[in-house]
Amino acid sequence: MSEDAQRPAGLIGPNAILQLLPLLDRIGGPERRNRMLAAAGIFDVPDGSCMIPEGDAARLHQQLRKEEPDLAPCLSSVAGYETANYILSHRIPRPAQWVLHTLPPAPSARLLSRAIKKHAWTFVGSGRLRVPNAWTFEIEDNPLIRGERSETCLCHWHAAVFARLYQALVSPSCTCEECRCGAQNGGGPCRFEVRCAALHVG
């Protein structure tokens, strides 16, 4: 059975919402958070025990960009960072993390990128992930920005997830940038590039 056949259609991991909630509390308290959830059509906050409809996560991210255009990139990045921390604490076995830490950056990145591709359905929903190489990810039809149009890249949450995983498991010098977004003119996949300064040292 193919990976696409196994992937639950239209579902995404609950951290796409849950890691935003404490940040919404910080900028406006529980009342503001609840108003934003209601505006996004979310009346039952996920408990983290199962996958959630990707549309719920997409509407909340879109609502954040609508109400807080200046803060949204930072808040989304923090939420992505904390999502990766959750993955490190609960989803990647310690022995596997030890192996990735022990290897040099290049082979470690190859192993990590394969693992990310294998579990892509948890964070791309009905979108499609391509991994051209160990340092590049492309999300076709990204549900978190589907239907939106922007002059700038919007996928700060995904970029932060990739960055944090690579920093924790490959090298602290890793960064990740979305260099092309599907919301920009012409559409196409969202493209993320990871860079590792450790590869150019010495």
Image: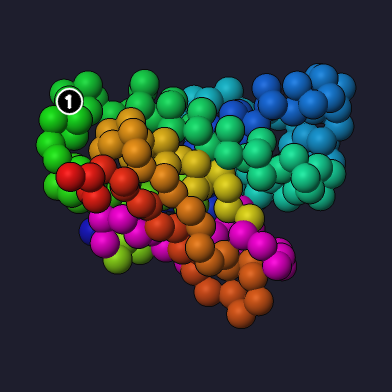
- Residue 137: image quadrant is bottom left
Q: Where's residue 138, x and y in %?
A: 42, 63
Vertical comparison of 198 with 14: above or below: below
Give the position of the N terminus as an image quadrant. bottom left
Q: Where's residue 69, x and y in %?
A: 79, 48
- Would you say residue 127 is visible in this rendering? no
Vertical comparison of 39 with 148: above or below: above
Residue at the limit of the structure toward the bottom, as seen here: 186
Residue at the (46%, 40%) spot, across then down: 161
Check disc 1: other Cα within 10 Å, few if <14, some if 14-19, many if 20+.
few
Residue 121 appears left or right of 98: right
Q: How many marks?
A: 1
Q: Where's residue 40, x and y in %?
A: 78, 43
Residue at the (58%, 47%) spot, across then down: 156
Q: Where's residue 84, x and y in %?
A: 43, 33
Residue at the (26%, 55%) spot, across then down: 134
Compare residues 144 and 49 and report the one nearer the observer.
144
Q: Is residue 147 magenta?
A: yes
Give the position of the C terminus as an image quadrant. top left
Which region shows up in magenta?
133-153
Amino acid type, residue under disc 1 in the picture: Trp
Q: Which residue is mark 1?
A: 98
- Would you say residue 17 is visible in this rendering? yes
